[in-house]
Amino acid sequence: MKKILVTGGCGFVGSALVSNLIAQNYRVIVVDTEWFGNFLPSHENLTCIKADIRNIEDIPFEDVDTIIHLANIANDPSVELNPSLSWEVNVLATQQMASEARKHGVKQFIYASSGSVYGIKEEEHVTEELDLVPISVYNKTKMVSERVLMSYQDDFKIHCIRPATVCGWSPRMRLDVSVNMFTWQALRNNEMTVFGGDQVRPNIHIQDMVNVYEHFLKNKEIESGCYNAGFENISIIDIANLIGKKLQGTKITVTESNDPRSYRQDSQKLLDTGFVQKYSVSDAIDDIIDSFEAGELQEGDNCFTVKWMRHLNLDQ
C-alpha cells in the first residue's frame, strides 16, 4: 500500500487529520519537530519521525503517494518573532520537499496555505481569482510557497488549500485563535476580552478542515490549483456574543485593537468539486465546552504559539 506523508502531523490540525487517516487504514508517516508535543495514538499504520523539515535528508519519500504539507511557522505574531526562521521553514523547506517529491514519483502534493494571502479586500466575495496582496511576512511566505509549488504542476497534482481560521477541539489544542480563545476564557474566567470586535474573519470547523484534506486525497483528479476553505465570515464580537449565549453570565469586555484587519472568503470553487460543509462555529464552541467539562481540554502554555516559541528560544 502506498503511503501518505504528513508534515506537521502532530499539530493542531495535523493531530485531528492523522487520527482520521489511520482510522481509515491509511499508512501514514508523520514528520514533525514535536515542539508542541505529540498527542497521536500508537497505531500499526503510523510512523512518527521527530525531525525538522529543513533537514530534507531526514524525510523518507520512498513509496509515498501523497504529501500533505502542514508544517509551518503559523500566524502573523509567531512569524514576526523570527522572520528568517519562518522563511526557511515556510518557503525554502517547501521548495526542497517539492523537488524531492518529483525525484521520488510522488503523485499529489496538498499544501496548507492561508486564507490571509489576499490581504485586506473590499469585495464581499473574496474568490481565488482576486489578486494576492499579502500584508505580513507570514502571508508573503504562503504566497511565495504557493507559486513555488504551482511551478511543479507538470510533475504531480498540486492542491494549495487556503484555510480560514480553524476552530474547535483537537488533541493538540490551540487557544490563541479567536473561537477557541474566547470559549476557553469564558469557561475558565467567566469573562472574555475582545480587542476591537468589528473585524470580520472567516472560520472553518476543524473537522471540516480535516474533511477538506481528505476530500482532495480521495479525489486526486481535481484540477491543480488554489482553493479557499472557509465558510463562516463572522465578526469577532459576534463570536463572543455566540459564546455568551451558550455560557450564560459570561462578561464581555471590549477594548481597543491595533489590528483592524478584516478577511472574508468565498469557497464556492471548493464546493463545486463536490465538497460538503458539515460543521459550524457553533459546533466548534460546543465541542470545546464538552471537552472542558469532560476534563479533556489541554490548557498548557504550549497551547499558545508565541508564548511557547519564546519558551523554546525560537525567537532568537
Image (spheres, grey):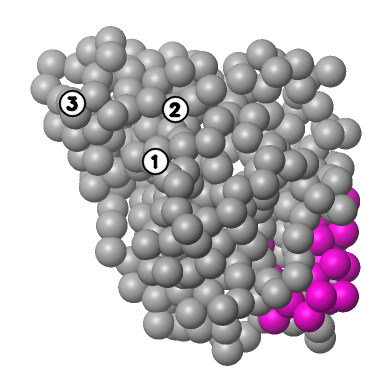
Between 89 and 179, the one lying in front of the other is: 89
Between 188 and 66, the one lying in front of the other is: 66
Residue 170 is tagged as: 1
Q: Quadrant of the C terminus?
A: top right
Q: Secondary structure at mark 3?
A: helix
Between 46 and 140, the one lying in front of the other is: 46
Q: Secondary structure at mark 2?
A: loop
Residue 293 is tagged as: 3
Whichever of callouts 3 and 1 sits on the residue coming sooner in the sequence is 1
Whichever of callouts 2 and 3 sits on the residue coming sooner in the sequence is 2
Q: CA distance from mark 2 to mark 3?
A: 16 Å
Whichever of callouts 2 and 1 sits on the residue coming sooner in the sequence is 1
Q: CA distance from mark 2 to mark 1?
A: 11 Å
Count neighbours of disc 1 (C-alpha within 10 A) and say few if under 14, some if 14 to 19, many if 20 or more.
many
Q: Secondary structure at mark 1?
A: loop
Which of the two discs, 2 and 3, sits closer to the camera? 3
User: Label 2 sits on what residue type?
Assistant: Leu
User: Label 3 sits on what residue type?
Assistant: Glu
Image coords of residue 15 (percent x, y): 48, 46
Answer left or right for 112 relative to 149: left
Image coords of residue 22 (percent x, y): 44, 61
Image coords of residue 179 (percent x, y): 37, 35
Q: Magenta region, mostly helix, strand or loop?
A: helix
The residue located at (20%, 17%) in the rendering is 250
Residue 80 is tagged as: none
Residue 175 is tagged as: 2
Image coords of residue 8 (percent x, y): 62, 47
Q: Which residues are magenta?
A: 91-111
